[in-house]
Amino acid sequence: MLTPLLLTELLREPLAAAGGRVVNVTGGMPRGPLQLDNVQAERGFVGLPSYSHAKLAMRR
């Protein structure tokens, strides 16, 4: 769920040094609270909620 966020964080400094930027785009799908206590889906993986949480994480 946090892969796009992690990738953005890892690339932030090199991109800034080169004058680059990151634009993350999400749609209207994300709903509900971000469940940070289950980011690795230890309590089970369900596709649509996991997708929604990944998009919701990018809005933070």
Image: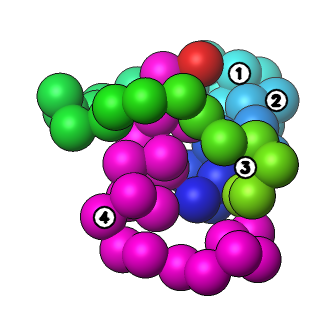
The residue segment tinted magenta is 40-59
Q: Which residue is mark 2?
A: 13
Q: Amino acid at mark 1?
A: Ala
Is 9 positioned to the left or the right of 55 in the image? Answer: right
Q: Amino acid at mark 3?
A: Leu
Q: Residues within 10 Å of mark 2 (few under 14, many from 20)?
A: few
Q: Amino acid at mark 4?
A: Leu
Residue at horizontal 54%, vertical 28%? 33
User: On residue 6, which mark appears?
Assistant: 3
What separation in Å lies between label 2 and label 1 (alpha carbons)? 5 Å
Q: Are marks 2 and 1 in contact (CB under 8 Å)?
A: yes
Q: Are marks 4 and 2 in contact (CB under 8 Å)?
A: no
Q: Nearer the N terminus, badge 1 or badge 4?
A: 1
Q: Quadrant of the N terminus?
A: bottom right
What separation in Å lies between label 3 and label 2 (alpha carbons)? 13 Å
Using the rendered image of the protein, determine whether residue 21 is visible from the camera's viewpoint: no
Of badges 4 and 3, nearer the viewer stands: 4
Q: Which residue is mark 4?
A: 48
| Residue 52: image location, x then y, percent | 37, 48
What separation in Å lies between label 4 and label 3 (alpha carbons)? 20 Å
Residue at horizontal 49%, vertical 46%? 53
Q: Nearer the N terminus, badge 3 or badge 2?
A: 3
Compare residues 2 and 52 and report the one nearer the observer: 52
Is 17 positioned to the left or the right of 20 in the image? Answer: right
What separation in Å lies between label 1 and label 4 (alpha carbons)? 33 Å
